[in-house]
Image (spheres, grey):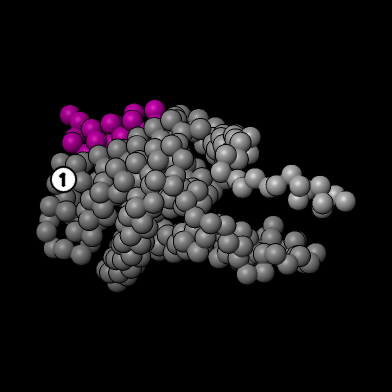
Amino acid sequence: MVSPSESLDVAELAIYLLLLSLTLFVVFRHGIHRQSGWIYLGIFCVIRIIGAALGIAAEKKPSNVSDLEWSAILGSVGISPLLLATLGLLKRITDESTKRIPTEGAMQGQSWFETVMSYTIIGRIYGRLGVHQFATSYRSRFLQILQLPAAIALIICIVGGSDLTDNSVSEQSTGKKLIKAGLIIFLIIYICLFLLIAKSASEIGGLPSSEKRVLAALILALPLLGVRILFSLLAYFSTISTFSPTNGNILVRAFMAVLEEILIVITYTLAGLLVPKYSDARIGDTEMENQRLETKVREPARFAPQQDPRVLVRGGA
């Protein structure tokens, strides 16, 4: 007989296999670069597919402890890719609604050493902090910086999840503390996202129509992401057995974690399918602006003061 946990894993596996094909289409459509946000959806789908497959294997062979351990580890790292996807999409619309401000040192020429270093891991982390890069605004630069603690929290949760599966009580205690630390970082990032999305919503009038769809997707996904983070906080900070990450209520996990994750991926994927490519959208907006300027130039100056012809003759003489 199939257990409720296995049924949930089977459902996740089927759903995310379908969503992965759609997210990959969106990723290649908009271009593979981290700041687009959609690449993290593909990573998230892969994580959930592997986790569900390992969960099914653990149910089939309970003696295989490694499958259960890795399933639990992958289950604890779902928040970070969703936060990174949200940060990437929010940066996209922030770049459209704010003025371009070059970061300090961006206008100065790079030496050959800096050029070589920019292709290394250290250089990429250094560049992520906004050095020698163009940030559209201070808000956009802040969104870039927020990606770093999100990645750090992801690593912390992976290490913590690994320690939780250890037989040692002390290692399990350390693992739980690490996961709590990672969740606190996720909560801080979520609060920052809430405030920044609210700020972007107040500037919706200055956004192109295509970017308004992305903003709508972010607004719809924000409460879902909040419920997902709340579930993890209750799982590790409360003593209520219903929210236990190991033997909690399967329905609670399905409706407070699994469902929210699926809806967020669907929302962001639909936004990626509906909006034009970033370069195409910018070209379209530029063409509209040029047409508007050309129309304004060709319009006769009805209210311009007329000079006396005699003054013109005298000036020519």
Query: Considering depth in this image, is 202 or 67 the residue closer to the camera?
Result: 202
Q: Residue sitting at 45 percent across and 36 percent down?
A: 210
- Give how far across and how far down residue 111 sits, in percent: 78, 67
- Give how far across and how far down residue 65 sits, in percent: 33, 49
Few, some or many residues within 10 Å of mark 1 (<14, 14–19, 20+): some
Q: Is residue 78 above or below residue 11?
A: below
Q: Is residue 151 rendered to the left or right of residue 68?
A: right
Query: Considering depth in this image, is 156 or 189 the residue closer to the camera?
Result: 189
**Helix, strand or loop status at disc 1:** helix
User: Would you say residue 157 is visible in this rendering?
Assistant: no
Q: Is residue 279 rendered to the left or right of residue 257?
A: right
Residue indicated by mark 1: 252
Q: Is residue 196 above or below residue 288?
A: below
Q: Is residue 238 above or below residue 80?
A: below
Q: Quadrant of the N terminus?
A: top left
Query: Considering depth in this image, is 68 or 35 the residue closer to the camera?
Result: 35
Q: Residue sitting at 58 percent across and 61 percent down?
A: 101
| Range covered by the magenta-colored residues | 1-19
- Give how far across and how far down residue 297 sits, in percent: 63, 39
Q: Is residue 65 magenta?
A: no
Q: Main secondary structure of the magenta part?
A: helix
Q: Residue sitting at 61 percent across and 47 percent down?
A: 305
Amino acid carrying mark 1 in the image: Val
Residue situated furthest right in the rendering:
317
Which of the 4 image quadrants contains residue 107?
Answer: bottom right
